[in-house]
Image (tube, grey):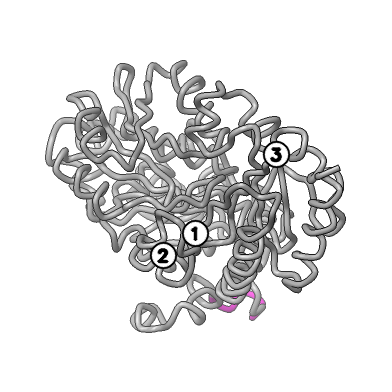
Amino acid sequence: MNDRIHRFGFDTLQIHAGSRPDPATGARQTPIYQTTAYVFRDSEHAAALFNLQEVGYIYSRLTNPTVAVLQERIATLEGGVGAVCCSSGHAAQIMALFPLMTPGCNVVVSTRLYGGSVTQFSRTFNRFGWSAKFIDFDDLEAIKAAIDKDTRAVFCESIANPGGYITDLPAVANIADNAEIPLIVDNTSATPYLCRPFEHGASLVVHSMTKYLTGNGTVTGGVVVDSGKFDWSASDKFPSLSKPEPAYHGLKFHETFGPLAFIFHGIAVGLRDLGMTLNPQAAHYTLLGIETLSLRMQKHVENAMAVAEWLESHPQIKAVTYAGLKSSPYNHRAGTVCPKGAGALLTATLKGGYDSCVKLVDNLELFSHVANLGDTRSLIIHSASTTHRQLSPEQQVAAGAAPDVVRISIGIEDPDDIISDLDQALKKAAT
């Protein structure tokens, strides 16, 4: 099957990629390998594994058979050479930057990011000696100007949370390529079904698997996927990958592992030392979710379009941000970057301001008021008072999370029921 796998369609790959019948039992579904450690054949086998001379299982902080299936499946769907799964989307962002950054280095970041990511990049990363330059990614010249000799990556979201803004990935990738640094794309809101960042020039992709990939709100998880196309040895900017690694007797990851250098480093150094491990049960739930990814995303997009059009014509709504709408300034990008749809995330600006937003959230019945997105259920949150609360008012506006805005994640329920619930709650919010 491996020889033919890239000929299969997305719907087939989301079910079969990386998965084989269990050799011990013949079990067709991927088992949950709930084990901490693995027995070595002999002392020579153990030594070869620890020296990275042989691929295999050592300890579940590093590798696990259930997680390995998930890594292969996501890498295949994204069109990458490999993936490293970890404990959350935030963990994935650290894992993506860890091999690239050293104290004093910076990353150029879009202002349109999830609020928690803004805080992580602007506050927490400072403790590592890293810094972030936040730029409006609609201003390509500003991105170019922000990159300096200490910049090690460019980071953005394909479909930005919360506003559904679509990044011009080809243009941004071209800037990163000219600067000889990788473009890292958070593809959480789009999933590889709607957007394939590697086809637009990205070098690395990250996901919060907690969202659409799992799709059922049961577990947290993250993943980093490598395109395998970036030359880590082209300059001296990435010594962790191009220079001798003391912990492995001077092994050079890029020289030794070629296109898989980043993945091997992520496991052998990143997971080894950071310990952001994905547990096998979480991997199992995510594998189950991915089996229906295309079906769910089609329904998500169909429902989101219907709801966005309805909201846009509602008298209490000042504005709707959804790239699927013809009125959106990013509608033209949807056809190129996200040809199968603009996702299911949108925001609505209420004419009644902050108070109306709170009333709307409190009066919804079908919707769930939660700090999550990408569930089969329709979800809502007032970002300014929750997920983006730590940001300044200026940062909230830049991120698309102003005080008069609610973020809506459209589920796969009957669209008439979704609209009916919004309608009754908006009426109450007006009083």
- Earlier in the chain: of badge 1 and badge 2, it is 1
Q: What's the residue at 52%, 74% (across, down)? A: 14
Q: What's the residue at 70%, 39% (across, down)? A: 382
296 vs 142, nearest the viewer: 142
Residue 220 percent across, percent down from the top left: 65, 47
Residue 151 percent across, percent down from the top left: 25, 28
93 vs 61, nearest the viewer: 93
Relative to residue 32, is residue 106 depicted above or below?
A: above
Relative to residue 59, is residue 296 depicted above or below?
A: below
User: Of tags 3 and 2, which is closer to the observer?
Assistant: 3
Amino acid type of the residue that numbered disc 1 sits on in the rendered structure: Ala
The disc label shown at residue 190, or none: 1
| Res 39 seen here | no
The disc label shown at residue 382, or none: 3
Which residues make up the magenta segment? 20-26
The disc label shown at residue 338, or none: 2
Q: Is residue 24 magenta?
A: yes
Amino acid type of the residue that numbered disc 2 sits on in the rendered structure: Cys
The disc label shown at residue 103, or none: none
Q: Residues within 10 Å of mark 2 (few under 14, many from 20)?
A: many
Quarter of the figure with the C terminus: top right
Residue 242 percent across, percent down from the top left: 20, 37
Q: What's the residue at 39%, 43% (across, down)? A: 156
